[in-house]
Image: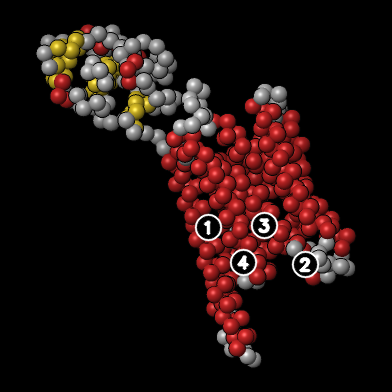
Amino acid sequence: MLEEFVGALPGMLAPALLVMTLSVLLGVGEGRDMPFSRRWRLYGLLIGLGAALVFTVLRVMVIVNRRSVVNLPVLIGCVVCDLLIVVAMIGSTRLVRNWRRYTVWLHAANAVGAIGIALTTFFASQDVFMQLTSFVETGESPFTSKMLLRTLGFVLGVGAAVLVAAIFRTMRTTAVRGSFLVASLLMMLILLVRHLTQLCSLLMSLMIVQFHGSVFQLLIVAANNNTKLVIASVLVFAIPAASSIVAGFRAPLAGSNGAVVREHKAFRRRAKAAGAWSLIVMVAVTFALTAGIAKIHEQPTLSPPEGYSQHNGVATIEFNKVDDGHLHRFEYKAKDGTVMRFIIIKKNGGSYGVGLDACMTCGDAGYYEKDGKIICKRCAVEMNVATIGFNGGCNPIPFPFEASHGKITIQTSDLDALSSHFKE
């Protein structure tokens, strides 16, 4: 669930914020007195989502196996549109103030915005939609609690992106327009950096262009800090949020009549609420992405080795030390000086699974227990506890042992023969 959430949220934030900012900065007129081009931005969003969904299906069906062929022109278009949208945003105040005088230019701005929204949405939502293909694992029933949790995480991620943009939009009537414009421009510049970084990385992977020196280092820094750039594109709206809160405190309470006074009070409440809620969602997004991604990529630590007796070449572990059904880890120093680990777990049938804390596939990465499951630290594969003690796959490498008279006995010579599995 958490993995799907932090995968969907940053992926949909860019389209959501872009649609929101252009809606605020290029929105003019009331009722029927609005330019027909205002709908182009909505069409751009729908086309981007539809194209991304179709492209995802084609990738899953392996009809398209090289997405770079499509993404290269898309990213070039994104970079060009980002630059044009920045120009449109800078001139938006004059356009909306005298839109009848600059109707053609407003149509042009809406057209550029629609194309930019379509391309950004198409590129950003590809990986988001690809998550849908992993909701049901191979051989797993489609109706499981895991699938429902993955779906819930996906829906919450997409919903959170839309909610963030919707809350920021409430500041359109409370914050100083200039502060909202500055935040929007900063957001666009961050999006431009992200698109430019992705374009350059793709050009390098296709061997079309090669970058060296400081330019290459900048690309590496930008690519490695993509999540921080996503968070920054949200935090820039602290500028209009602060402006909205200040406006709420500064708005006069006096008026020529009771209706005006009530209107001023309502504005104060609305301005403070819009700014405060915007700040809250900024903190929430920052926490969700930093803590969520850190949790997903958290490296599990192996439990410390437990004690046991060793005498005359025989290691002995009492049943009462390992009969709780949990994973128990032990350490042994072989004759050649290699420090080895082995594990023991009691199975459901009463027998014991014994093997090295290593496998033929993943080496000596080891295994850990989580939520009652035994998982390989390197490949994250969940072990079938019943197969521990048998050869094959990612199972712990087995070795001879005896389980009788209330104890497990292991000949240390058998461990010595397997010490190579723990050598670098």
Q: Tell me the quarter of the picture where residue 155 sits.
A: top right
For label 2, count other residues whose C-alpha is less than 10 Å away and answer few (under 14), some (14-19) or many (20+): few
Per the image, label 2 sits on a secondary structure element best described as loop
- Determine the residue positioned at 22% across, 18% down: 350
- Residue for badge 3: 20
Query: Mark 4 or mark 1, which has the lower sequence index?
Result: 4
User: Which of the marked residues, 2 or 3, is nearer the chain's N terminus?
Assistant: 3
| Of residues 402 and 133, the one drawn nearer to the viewer in this rendering | 133
For the residues labelled 4 and 1, the Cα–Cα distance comes to 14 Å
Q: Amino acid at mark 3?
A: Met
**Which residue carries the number 4 mark?**
171
The residue drawn where x is 51% and y is 52% is 285
Question: Of label 4 and label 2, which has the lower sequence position?
Answer: 2
> Between marks 4 and 3, how big is the CA–CA gap?
11 Å
Task: Give the residue drawn at x 72%, y 63%.
Answer: 25
Q: Nearer the viewer, mark 2 or mark 3?
A: 2
- The local secondary structure at tag 3 comes to helix
Disc 4 from disc 2: Cα separation:
21 Å
* Local secondary structure at mark 4: helix
Q: Position of residue 392 (x, y in %)?
A: 40, 11
- Cα–Cα gap, marks 1 and 3: 16 Å
Percent of width and height locating residue 191: 66, 49
Kind of residue sitting beneath label 2: Gly
- The residue labelled by disc 1 is 282
Residue behind mark 2: 31
